[in-house]
Amino acid sequence: MTVPSIRDLAAWRQQPGPSGIPSVCSAHPLVLEAAMRATLTTRLPLLIEATCNQVNQDGGYTGMTPADFRAMVVGIAERASFPLERLILGGDHLGPNPWKALDAEAAMGKAETMIRAYAAAGFTKLHLDCSMGCAGEPIALDDAETAARAARLAKAAEEASPDPDQAPVYIIGTEVPVPGGALEAIEGLEVTRPAAVRETVAVHRRAFREAGLEDAFERVIAAVVQPGVEFGNHNVIVYDSSEASALSRTLDDLPGLVFEAHSTDYQPPSALAALVEDGFAILKVGPGLTFALREALYGLDMIATELYPESGRHSLRDTMEAVMLSSPDNWRKYYEGSAQEQALLRHFSYSDRIRYYWPEPQAKAAVEALLQQLDGVDIPEPLIAQYLGGLLKKVRNEVVAPRARDLLFAAIEDVMTDYIEACKG
């Protein structure tokens, strides 16, 4: 099987086979293994990305450096028999954002160290995002300063890249949706203006040229834009191809480029397919995958309670509630409303802030205890129908075994498959 190179992504649309690629933005081992399982039989490479806040030289909120993250992904791939040559590691929003409370020079120095670590660890898809102001600067910088700082980071990445034959590709432009989803209900979005895209590309081209990075700019494969997709705590703005038609046509003037769409989580399959067809060829998904993980775990937890009512095991939901209440920083400023409303959001919001808590020791132990309790158990179909109904047809058709881990992987793979099918993998 020939796997296409992401460097040629713009040409995929004119060739048989894939015309886009999902970008899996998660550090959860079960999510990553499920993504590998779903991708294995396709022609697609598997693109896995970490963000600047999630993974950096200081450990980020996962506690992992880029080298640590790579080692984790490689370990999962080896266990899942996923070919390492089909893995692409990406870095998202690489810039001064984690250190923007510092003055610009100090923050950019930290950002340079970070992107060098990403490049040295073999991350070959790098999103350059220097749009945010640092201490004493405006909240958002103008295009010229943003591009100059991006070129500075590209230079650092070029110097740190260990293999000239695997030189990194770059993504430019700034995500319009709030990372992780909007903070409240949303009614509509402004699609990126074609003129703004042309200006972003032109300014970055000039900045790269002034930095002596003409060759590196030839490896810019995409620009981040807002095609009109987003999700909040309760709702999803679904892609409307007609609203983005002018933006899509801009690609006719930008040979070699595609668009990268962030916050595509929870889009219906038809919308994902339309995004790819319209040139939004990189589809970022993260919370949608961990939302499916949480759904399946909570369903399995209810099944275990039905099967073993006298076991004395605390429910997974109660455990997660205690973990989140004891460390509220990752949800408190994102979830508004009454105490009852916040409690519902902690577990069921589309923003899925609960994903930050699965690595906690108490949460990991609770998940493992649940899966051990159900290990080797053939779960009765009526309980699957009640608590994991979306998987019942696959169980009845013997596509998925009625076992806890199989059901858990299948739930995540269902989401991943929507993206794969949209990308024609």
Image (spheres, rainbow, N blue to C red):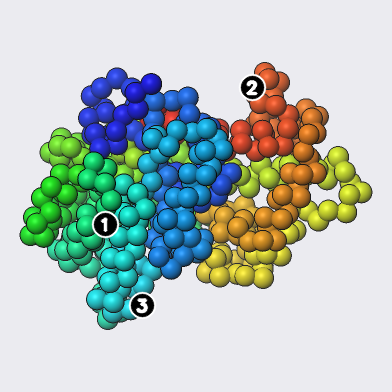
Q: Quadrant of residue 305?
A: top right
Q: Determine the residue positioned at 35% across, 67% down.
A: 97
Tell me the crowding category of disc 1: few under 14, some 14 to 19, or many 20 or more residues within 10 angstroms, Cα based. some
Q: Does residue 263 appear in this view?
A: no
Q: Quadrant of residue 307?
A: top right
Q: Amino acid at mark 3?
A: Ala
Q: Is residue 141 left or right of residue 329?
A: left
Measured as percent of width and height from the top left, residue 345 is found at 61, 58
Q: Quadrant of residue 371?
A: top right
Point out the residue furthest to the right here.
310
Earlier sequence position, callout 2 versus callout 1: 1
Q: Amino acid at mark 1?
A: Ala
Question: Where does label 2 land, which residue?
Answer: 399
Q: Which mark is residue 160?
A: 1
Q: Determine the residue positioned at 71% across, 21% down.
A: 396
Marks 2/1: CA–CA distance: 45 Å
Q: Does residue 45 appear in this view?
A: yes
Marks 2/3: CA–CA distance: 51 Å
Tag 2–tag 3 contact (CB < 8 Å):
no
Q: In terms of depth relative to the viewer, which is nearer, 195 or 19?
A: 19
Question: Where does label 3 land, which residue?
Answer: 101
Secondary structure of residue under mark 3: loop
> Which tag is nearer the camera, tag 2 or tag 1?
1
Measured as percent of width and height from the top left, residue 224 is found at 28, 49
Measured as percent of width and height from the top left, residue 232 is found at 49, 53
Q: Amino acid at mark 2?
A: Val
Tell me the crowding category of disc 2: few under 14, some 14 to 19, or many 20 or more residues within 10 angstroms, Cα based. few
Q: Determine the residue positioned at 76% across, 50% down.
A: 369
Earlier sequence position, callout 2 versus callout 3: 3
